[in-house]
Amino acid sequence: MRFMSRAVHRLTSTANILAPSRPNTTIRFVPGIKPQRVSASTMSSSTPVKLAILDDYASIALPHFQAVQGQVQIDTFPTTLNARIPAEHTQLVERLKPYTVISSMRERTLFPRSVLEQLPNLKLLLTTAMKNAAIDLAACKDLGITVVGTTPKPNAVKGYDATNEITWALILGFAKDVVHGDTVIKSASAGWQTHLTFGLAGKTLGLLGLGKLGTQCAVTGVLGFGMKVLAWSSSLTQEKADEAAQSRGLPKGSFQVAGSKKELFERADVLSVHYVLSDRSRGIVGAAELAAMKKSAFLVNTSRGPLVDEPALVAALEAGTIRGVALDVFDTEPLPKDTPWRRSGYWGQDGRSRILVSPHMGYVEEETMNSWYEQQGRAVASWIKGEEVKGIMQ
């Protein structure tokens, strides 16, 4: 509580110093690297509080900041800059230097120390949820930057996550080849069935990781599709797997634990990744794991792109050694123009495996996104008024 009080005091003090009594509003929409003014009025002679909204791909954020639009200058930057690329790192710093408050969305923009320490005006960094691996919290603490997160959407149902929904959308979409069927019908006047689909009942659902999301995926596989579940992680035991099953009303033994990672990949018909990304787990799915998979099996990743060795995956798909892959996450997001995942008319041809790709849609539900921005808007309003700010992470 003493830490919370210090953080609130720091926010209150900063707001009182920086916020003018009634400055005019400037709202700008920035499609590229340099801000382009859309509408503006003369600013107060006092230094205005400046708010940057980053990575609002769906353009839904601004209405949630209406309460402060008469008190701050708001700029939006929907184009993401990647701090891992030196040139874009420099551009990101130059873009954000003027801002007192930054609204970020999940892990779309990285905030390493090398960026944060070059933002002298930044006092309040807004993020979504209460964890964000893209923000260096230790650096924020050292630099006196307060980080504020958000809570789940009001209608969230415990034990049911949007990531599980996108996981099964991809599994079913790939197994039943829905996108191809849609394309065949729309592209030819007489287009109809061209090949067969993949059944799930009785097949083995392999889970790399059996945490919260892995368990949800397992339950869906067992109850929804009559699949057998085989799981593995470096710390998973049969006792823990039984506890996970029983926590969802299933009997012991519903989830079997593989004796090794190699066994998991050898036996799975559908291999879904549900691992936490860390330095140790980066590339946990590599050439050896892909080589162990059945030719009839396919891989699904809705966790984090770097968990899978992308060059090794592309090589396996080009060689057609597995049925294919369904992806919602990638090494670099948004995907660059020259990525192999954007190749049209390439995959699924001439012996190459099929792919199904989605632009990281796992968490972007309308209720969730609007709730997150609403909470961010309230946080800025409270900060401006010198009131307590909820959701302080650091």
Image (cartoon, grey):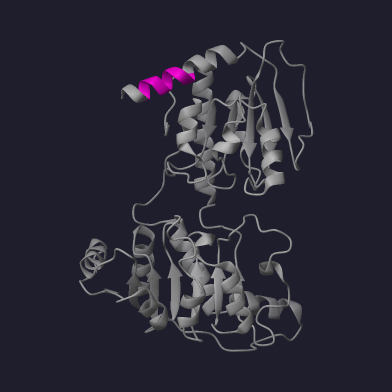
Identified at 47% across, 68% down, the residue is 168
The C terminus - image quarter: top left
* Above or below: residue 68 compared with residue 198: above
- Write down the region rendered in magenta: 4-11
Identified at 46% across, 59% down, the residue is 163
Q: Position of residue 64 (x, y in %)?
A: 58, 34
* Above or below: residue 338 compared with residue 156: below
261 vs 25, left or right, is left
Q: Is residue 380 magenta?
A: no
Quarter of the rendering containing residue 33? top right
* Above or below: residue 280 compared with residue 114: below
Quarter of the rendering containing residue 333? bottom right
Residue 104 seen = yes
Q: Position of residue 225 (x, y in %)?
A: 39, 77
Q: Position of residue 224 (x, y in %)?
A: 38, 73
128 vs 28, left or right, is left
Q: Nearer the viewer, residue 104 or 154?
A: 104
Q: Main secondary structure of the magenta part?
A: helix
* Above or below: residue 253 compared with residue 380: below
Quarter of the rendering containing residue 31? top right
Residue 103 seen = no
Identified at 52% across, 69% down, the residue is 170
